[in-house]
C-alpha cells in the first residue's frame, strides 16, 4: 500500500489523541462521501429503477462484479461513477444498508 510521505510526516507529529481524532474525522468524511455517491447514483444512473431494493442490488452487483438483473452497460456506469467519486469500492455497504440509505431520503 502506498501512503503519501507528507501524510506520514504529518501523522508522526501528532499526539496519540490528535491522531485518533484525525482518524475519526477521516472515517466520518469517508462515510459522508460514500453516502453522497450512493444517493447520487440512485438519483441519476438508477433513476429509472422503481424499486429501492433493485437499485441496492444493482449497486451491490456492480461492486462485487456480478452480472445481476440489470444490463451490463448500467452496471458499468455504476462502477465508473463510484470510481469517479470515491476512487475505490471499499466501504460500500451491502444491499440492505444501501436500501436503508434510499429509504432515508
Image: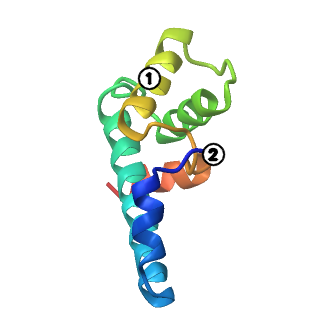
Up-down relation of residue 5 to residue 9 (above or below): above
* Residue 62 against residue 104 in the figure, above or below: above
Q: Contact, CB < 8 Å: mark 1 with mark 2?
A: no
Q: Is residue 25 above or below residue 15?
A: above
The x, y position of residue 61, in whole percent, is 63, 29
Please tell me which residue lies in front, 33 or 93: 33
Total labels drawn: 2
Q: Position of residue 99 (x, y in %)?
A: 50, 49
The location of residue 64, given as percent across then percent down, is 67, 32
Q: Is residue 98 left or right of residue 61?
A: left
Name the secondary structure under disc 2. Answer: loop
Which residue is located at x 67 percent, y 25 percent? 65
Name the quarter where the C terminus is drawn. bottom left
> What residue is shown with label 1?
80
**Which residue in the protein does label 2 denote?**
1
Compared across the picture, whether 68 is left or right of 59 comes to right
Which of labels 1 and 2 is toward the front?
A: 2
Q: Quadrant of the N terminus?
A: top right
Question: In terms of secondary structure, where does tag 1 sit?
Answer: helix
Asked if residue 40 is positioned above or below residue 19 in the image, the reply reads: above
Say if residue 50 shows up in the picture: no
Q: Residue at x 42, y 41 (%)?
A: 86
Spatial distance from mark 1 to mark 2, Cα to Cα?
22 Å
- Return the disc, 1 or 2, that comes first in the chain's sequence: 2
Q: Quadrant of residue 25?
A: bottom left
The residue at 55%/39% (across/down) is 89
The location of residue 30, given as percent across then percent down, is 42, 57
Amino acid at each position: 500500500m502506498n501512503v503519501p510521505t507528507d501524510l506520514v510526516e504529518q501523522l508522526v507529529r501528532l499526539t496519540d489523541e490528535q491522531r485518533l481524532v484525525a482518524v475519526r474525522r477521516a472515517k466520518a468524511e469517508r462515510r459522508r462521501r460514500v453516502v453522497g455517491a450512493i444517493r447520487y447514483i440512485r438519483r441519476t444512473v438508477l433513476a429509472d429503477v422503481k424499486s429501492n431494493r433493485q437499485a441496492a442490488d444493482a449497486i451491490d452487483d456492480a461492486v462485487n462484479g456480478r452480472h445481476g438483473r440489470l444490463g451490463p452497460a448500467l452496471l458499468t456506469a455504476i462502477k465508473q461513477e463510484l470510481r469517479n467519486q470515491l476512487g475505490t469500492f471499499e466501504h460500500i455497504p451491502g444491499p440492505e444498508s444501501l436500501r436503508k440509505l434510499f429509504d432515508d431520503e
